[in-house]
Amino acid sequence: MTRHSSLDGWPSAAVRASAGLLAAVWLLELSNLARPSRLLSALVMAGLLAFVLLALLRASVHIRVLFAGVGGLAASIAAMKSEPALLVAGLERALVFGAFLPSVLLLRATVENSPRIASLREGVEALDGQARENWMVCGSHALGSVLNVGTMGILAPVLGRDTSASDRVALAAASVRGVGTAVMWSPFFVSLGFVSHLVPSVKLWEVMALGAGLALAGLALSGRMFTPNLGVAGFLASTGRLLPLVVPTVVIVGTILAVATALSLSGPAAVAAGVPLLCAAYLAFAGRARAARVARDTLRSFGRLADEMIIIVGATVLGTVIARIPEAAAIAGTLTPSFLSGTSLIITLMLLLIAGGLAGLHPMIGATILLPILAGGAFGVRDVVLVETAVFAWGLSATVSIWTLPVAVASSMFGVPLRALATGRPLRFAALYVVVAAAYLSIANAWMAG
């Protein structure tokens, strides 16, 4: 998504209004999750629409065009069917993201203000060559699973001023790979939460488990391609410096899984419900000063959350409309298994979403249109595999597409050209990862089919 560097402070009333409005939507939706009511849902819907309208005033042209296309298509379908209730149903499904994204931002602010983060940088200067690159991949993966692209701002400063241009490129690309592979399984990325939301039958733990295997395959491929001479001792020495992250990460992810399983919540709802409780428990013992910094940083980040929420709301409405019209089931019925099934469907879906992402069409849009149709057909592909295929395509697009936030942030934080992160070795890694992922998902689908 597009960055808004002018929003680093509080330069405009529009930014302050956006932050306050989203904070109100967040609190209302948390209350609605705890005790659902029509009044709360209506208030959250009104607040979310107001936020989207305000965000559109300062969104990038690319996002405005996408939103106009997605929203216009959804409205056209609803008008042709004479069912405006379809749009309302789509907005109702989008409400949970009014709590999901703010909860992720609260978690990010809490982790960034933790003293454990400072300990990550200690001793890294002693690493060199492939050991440092391995540390960057694994560190970006572990920290990125919770902080998303915010991890780059934490890890990039370990580079000394005398770091060569080639080393900067290698470490920037490593950070992108680490975050991109974390996309495959982490419930704190919009990708997994949004795509799994399109197919409600899929359990959060199922797609996380499938994605974890895909992430491990990506990390193994990265090691084979970029740090082949590191050796076991070098690997253990560099990754051992990440030990301060292990316990907090296990606690955070375990809590979200427990909440999702115990309360039968979707991934976004489990994150929205579980994260504020975790952060509140931590901040209760962290001291008033740190809690105040977390609150300030969280509220400030709300003002920057424009493009993401715009696309999520538009895509959710369109996906709901498509899923609820009879024509979607009819289209699925025409795509017989002889036309697309099993591995061929997995590869086709993967390549379509990746190609769209490289062309500037966010994978969220392609997934929104395709998954409700494909999930309704008998194509010999398990729903969880369909979901993970879309998540993989989203994550891979984020590692090589210049339109995406990970690539843009890495370019800025590490001071390297955009093209260096989307061509050459990164592109070869992406091509091989597609082959590995297609084989992995096909084998997993065959195994689950029994």
Image: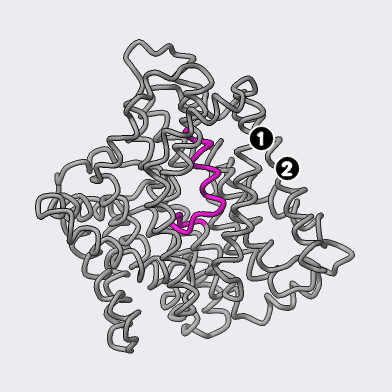
Q: Nearer the viewer, residue 267 or 431?
A: 267
Mark 2 closeness class: few <14, some 14–19, many ≥20 residues within 10 Å:
some
What x and y, as percent, mark residue 297? 20, 49
Say which residue label 1 marks. Answer: 221
Q: Which numbered disc, 2 or 1, marks the residue closer to the eye?
A: 1
Q: Answer yes or no: do the residues labelled 2 and 1 have beta carbons within 8 Å?
A: yes
Magenta span includes 176: yes
Say which residue label 2 marks. Answer: 436
Asked if residue 362 shows in the view, the reply is: yes
Magenta-tinted stretch: 175-191
For the point 50% across and 63% down, which residue is it? 194
Magenta span includes 76: no
What x and y, as percent, mark residue 12? 14, 48
For the point 33% across and 89% down, which residue is it? 38
For the point 37% across and 47% down, which residue is it? 147
Where is residue 406, by image quadrant?
Answer: top left
Q: Which residue type does callout 1 highlight?
A: Leu
